[in-house]
């Protein structure tokens, strides 16, 4: 019997992990491929807001369960104490005494393998498969593999693999601030349903949220937010988005707009929001992102609401109907009085995409007339609307 073992914290399990497991499955065609989330990692604790071991186990089942011959094991998370890899392999040897076991690891792990606990004995128990990007680190890996083979009699196979770029740290930051992620839909749904990777424990009622927003904004900004919320709800009812989400997004969309630049940058650091040099000079470019983070993490809003808030100023790629309704509502709420505001309101009643396209085009002309910076998010949103008309 041939078994491949692939372990990790999987916090959360992402496309990079899935691609690695699929590659190991394709390369070795094992009788059993064990995906094993760690219980308590040996070398460092899991970061704050991490799911429970049982929740990470379920996330792994959702991520890997459809790959041939994969079994997601609860062995390590079920142990009362932390487990070294060699302990896990010994337990597998007792359960499958005649099995050949291959341990799947990344290239970074091979470079540190000589420091692992009881590595001499581990190398006697398993073959080692190293997933390596073709040509990227061949020389260093070959040297390390030769060293381990000579010193520990390790049996090492280099498995060519083009990894999917997906960092757990960056994903946790996205999850915490309500951003869009590349996670599988079932994984994302489980995370949101169980309120994982976020600190807010309960969504505020509409009255509670209204009071909180009113206290945070100037009277003029609050009045604009209420009008935007009402307009967004009307657009959502007309064009098939959730009216309640649209109203809540409208109330919260300018939550941080009045903050000074340094306060915006502080929130960016708090929520690991990437900023560029242009962002560091103008707070207006940041309030969509910082407002979305607070709406999700402090006010307990849904990811859909947070994503809509994030792109309400500039637009963005792959805007869903809720985001489109909020973006347009902010531009055409009843007190907006620029030249063709009424024309856009009328157009929005009959053709949402046409109204959006006209709004993006107007914004672009306005920026060009002022010789102002044009952000790529708006161009992307406009181009996607144009493509949809083809």
Image (cartoon, grey):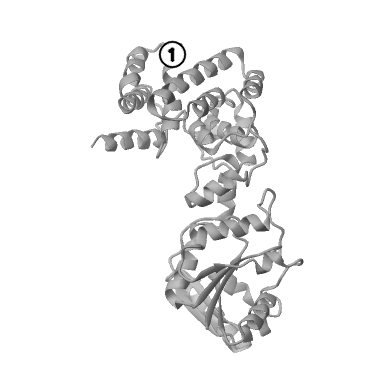
Q: Where is residue 314 in the image (x, y as percent from the top left)?
A: 44, 30
Observer-nearest of 343 and 193: 193
Q: In this view, does 53 lie above or below 313?
A: below
Residue 170 visible, this orientation: yes
Q: Where is residue 22 in the image (x, y as percent from the top left)?
A: 45, 67
Observer-nearest of 317 and 234: 234
Q: Where is residue 368 in the image (x, y as percent from the top left)?
A: 34, 25
Return the residue at label 1.
Answer: 336
Picture quadrant where residue 340 is located: top left
Q: Which residue is drawn at 44% across and 20% down?
A: 234
Observer-nearest of 223 and 271: 223
Observer-nearest of 242 and 326: 242
Mark 1 is surrounded, within 10 Å at the Cα level, by few (under 14), some (14 to 19) or many (20 or more) other residues, namely few
The quarter of the rendered structure image containing the C terminus is top left
Figure label count: 1
Residue 330 visible, this orientation: no
């Amino acid at each position: 019997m041939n078994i491949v073992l692939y372990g990790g914290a999987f916090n959360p399990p992402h496309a990079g992990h899935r691609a690695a497991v699929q590659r190991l499955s394709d390369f070795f065609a094992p009788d059993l491929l064990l995906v094993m989330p760690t219980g308590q990692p040996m070398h460092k604790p899991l970061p704050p807001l991490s799911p429970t071991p049982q929740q990470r186990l379920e996330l792994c089942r959702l991520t890997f369960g459809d790959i041939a011959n994969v079994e997601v094991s609860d062995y390590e998370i079920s142990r009362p104490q932390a487990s070294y890899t060699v302990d896990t392999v010994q337990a597998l040897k007792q359960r499958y005494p005649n099995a050949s076991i291959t341990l799947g690891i990344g290239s970074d792990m091979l470079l540190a393998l000589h420091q692992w606990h009881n590595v001499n004995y581990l190398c006697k128990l398993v073959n080692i498969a190293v997933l390596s990007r073709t040509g990227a680190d061949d020389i260093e890996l070959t040297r390390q593999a030769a060293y381990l083979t000579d010193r520990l009699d390790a049996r090492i196979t280099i498995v060519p693999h083009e990894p999917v770029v997906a960092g757990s740290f960056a994903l946790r930051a996205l999850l915490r601030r309500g951003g869009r992620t590349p996670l599988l839909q079932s994984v994302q749904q489980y995370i949101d349903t169980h309120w994982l990777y976020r600190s807010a424990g309960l969504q505020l009622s509409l009255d509670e949220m209204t009071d909180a927003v009113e206290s945070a904004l100037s009277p003029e900004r609050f009045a604009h937010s209420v009008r935007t919320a009402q307009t967004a709800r009307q657009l959502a009812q007309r064009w098939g988005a959730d009216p309640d989400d649209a109203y809540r997004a409208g109330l919260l969309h300018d939550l941080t707009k009045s903050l000074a630049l340094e306060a915006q940058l502080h929130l960016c650091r708090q929520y690991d929001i990437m900023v560029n040099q242009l962002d560091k000079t103008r707070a207006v470019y940041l309030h969509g992102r910082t407002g979305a983070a607070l709406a999700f993490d402090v006010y307990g809003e849904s990811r859909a609401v947070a994503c809509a808030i994030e792109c309400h100023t500039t637009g963005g790629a792959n805007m869903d109907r809720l985001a489109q309704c909020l973006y347009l509502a902010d531009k055409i709420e009843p007190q907006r009085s620029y030249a063709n505001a009424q024309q856009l309101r009328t157009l929005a009643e009959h053709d949402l995409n046409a109204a959006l396209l006209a709004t993006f085009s107007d914004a672009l002309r306005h920026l060009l007339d002022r010789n102002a910076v044009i952000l790529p998010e708006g161009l992307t949103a406009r181009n996607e609307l144009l493509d949809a008309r083809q």
